[in-house]
Amino acid sequence: MELDGKVSIITGAGSGIGAACARAFAAQGSRMVVADRNLDGARAVAEEIDALAVGCDVRRKQDIEALVAAAEKSYAGRRLLQ
């Protein structure tokens, strides 16, 4: 998959496998949205890879809607990968 110039949203990206995926996607040129219930963890990873950090509990519909809205606002005009 070609990631250069795309926007990717990864949930659970504040630590572990999600953080590793966010770093790998960013290394391939994707602009990243790092989402996690642990906002401090998301912020730490986002700072490392120059990404947007969003607090999100994927069990809550309103959190998911806010996550997508934040990504669209921050990266207006770019194609989102989900």
Image (tube, rainbow, N blue to C red):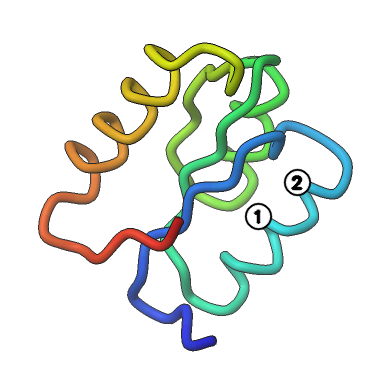
- In the image, farthest residue toward the left: 77
Residue placed at 36% from the left, 70% from the top?
6
Q: Is 69 placed above or below 2 here?
A: above
- In the image, farthest residue toward the bottom: 2
Image location of residue 49, percent across then percent down: 58, 52
36 sits left or right of 29 in the view: right
Residue placed at 50% from the left, 30% from the top?
53
Q: Is 53 placed above or below 48 here?
A: above
Tell me whether circle 2 and circle 1 mark residues in contact (CB < 8 Å): yes
Disc 2 on helix, strand or loop?
helix
Image location of residue 45, percent across then percent down: 67, 39
Q: Which residue is mark 1?
A: 22
Image location of residue 21, percent across then percent down: 73, 58
Disc 1 on helix, strand or loop?
helix
**Mark 1 belongs to which amino acid?**
Ala
Q: Residue 27's image quarter?
A: bottom right
Report the Cα–Cα distance between label 2 and label 1. 5 Å
56 sits left or right of 73 in the view: right
- The residue carrying pointer 2 sits among few (fewer than 14), some (14 to 19) or many (20 or more) residues within 10 Å by Cα, namely many
Q: Which residue is mark 2?
A: 19
Image location of residue 72, percent across then percent down: 21, 42
* Placement of the N terminus among the 4 image quadrants: bottom right
Residue placed at 23% from the left, 50% from the top?
75
Q: Which mark is residue 38?
A: none
